[in-house]
Image (cartoon, rainbow, N blue to C red):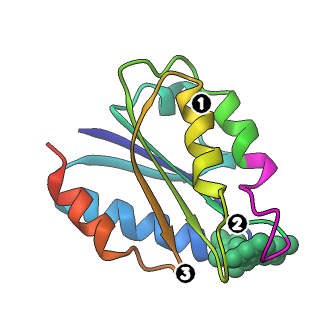
Amino acid sequence: MKIAIVYDSSTGTTAKAAEAMGKMMTEQGHQCRVQPWEQADPALVSDSDLICFGSWVKGLFVIMQRPTEASMRFMERLGDLTGKQAVVFCTYTLAAGSTLEQMARGLEKKGAQVVGQFKYRSSKPTDDFTSFVKSLA
Ligand SMILES: Cc1cc2nc3c(=O)[nH]c(=O)nc-3n(C[C@H](O)[C@H](O)[C@H](O)COP(=O)(O)O)c2cc1C
């Protein structure tokens, strides 16, 4: 499967999580490209079989949590994702609120089917992500 992992990271946690996710997917035999949104080409990302998008959680810690503006703007630049699968993930410290749902809605608006939503309190992907990778065709 051709997989694109794109992320927005300010202090490196989400970047490390994205790299770890990419490593696990590559080890399962997938062709995986991991990039910060600043370097990613929306057309190439849209051309993948599975698109994974990650953001850090921005808010007032207990309320108003959301993905970064840059994340949502990048998603808007993606092409038609009808027939594509997508995953959203975020890193946070206290509470992620509806961050993942907001990201999922952004990709669904483009036609993607969101098949996984993962939140991490560190840069280490959680066990449910490990199970998800094993379930990929
Ligand atoms: C301005 C700002 C707002 C934040 N708001 C939240 C929040 O509402 N909830 C939360 O759990 N973490 C919040 N965080 C913590 C970050 O989401 C968390 O540290 C994240 O892992 C950082 O990812 P990065 O290293 O990829 O930038 C906030 C951090 C900053 C700098």
Whether the residue carrying mark 3 lies under 8 Å from ligand 1 is answered with yes
Q: Is residue 11 visible in the rendered structure shown here? A: no
Which residue is labeled 2 in the image?
57
Q: Residue at x 65, y 57 (%)?
A: 98
Q: Quadrant of residue 14?
A: bottom right
The reply to whether dot 1 and dot 2 touch (C-beta < 8 Å) is: no
Q: Residue at x 67, y 64 (%)?
A: 97
Q: Position of residue 56 (x, y in %)?
A: 67, 65
Identify the secondary structure beneath mark 1: helix
Would residue 129 be found to the left or right of residue 36 on screen? left
Which residue is labeled 3 in the image?
121
Q: Amino acid at mark 1?
A: Pro
Whether the residue carrying mark 2 lies under 8 Å from ligand 1 is answered with yes
> Mark 1 to mark 2: distance in Å?
22 Å
Identify the secondary structure beneath mark 2: loop
Tell me which numbered mark, 3 or 2, is placed earlier along the sequence.
Answer: 2
